[in-house]
Amino acid sequence: MAADNRPLSPHLQVYRPQWTSVLSILHRATGVASAIGLVYVAWWLVAAATGGGYYDSFVWFAGSIVGNLLFMGFTFALFYHLCNGVRHLIWDTGRNLELEGAYKSGMFVLAGAGALTALAWILALAA
């Protein structure tokens, strides 16, 4: 019996990315981004509790382009993870498990996360 030189299971290089796999990977990435973003929020809270120059340095960083992009990314990560979590809850009821339903619900997740992020930032900047 000759040994085969092929992998035992398919590798990522074998398959091209599909919509559902990309959304699944994005769900995992936004979970990690949310955890990292909580460090940013913790810095904000500690700086507010400490006061003085420590809070001033946080406000300087948060007001910078990098600080705003980090907070916007954190906001999107939270809303994407929330919307996709609701999508998974719907799947747990046995709905939208067919390919067309999975694709449409994925579009709704992205649109909902984008709309909620935009709305949150519009309301935050208006306050």
Image: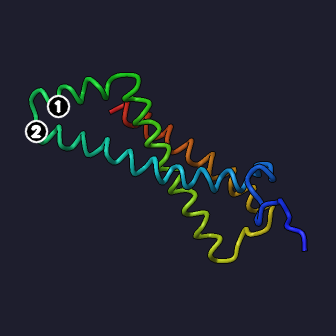
Question: Left or right: where does residue 118 sit relative to residue 10?
Answer: left
Q: Which residue is mark 1?
A: 55
> What residue is rendered at 40% in x and 22% in y?
65
Q: Amino acid at mark 2?
A: Thr
**Colour convention:** rainbow
Q: Which residue is mark 2?
A: 50
Q: Are marks 1 and 2 in contact (CB under 8 Å)?
A: yes
Identify the element where label 1 is drawn. Answer: helix
Q: x and y percent of residue 61 in the render?
A: 29, 26
Identify the element where label 2 is drawn. Answer: helix
Q: Amino acid at mark 1?
A: Tyr
> What residue is rendered at 37% in x and 31% in y?
126
Question: Left or right: where does residue 38 sit relative to residue 96?
Answer: left
> What residue is rendered at 17% in x and 31% in y?
55
Q: Which image quadrant is residue 46 in?
A: top left
Q: Which mark is residue 95?
A: none
Q: x and y percent of residue 119 in the render?
A: 48, 40
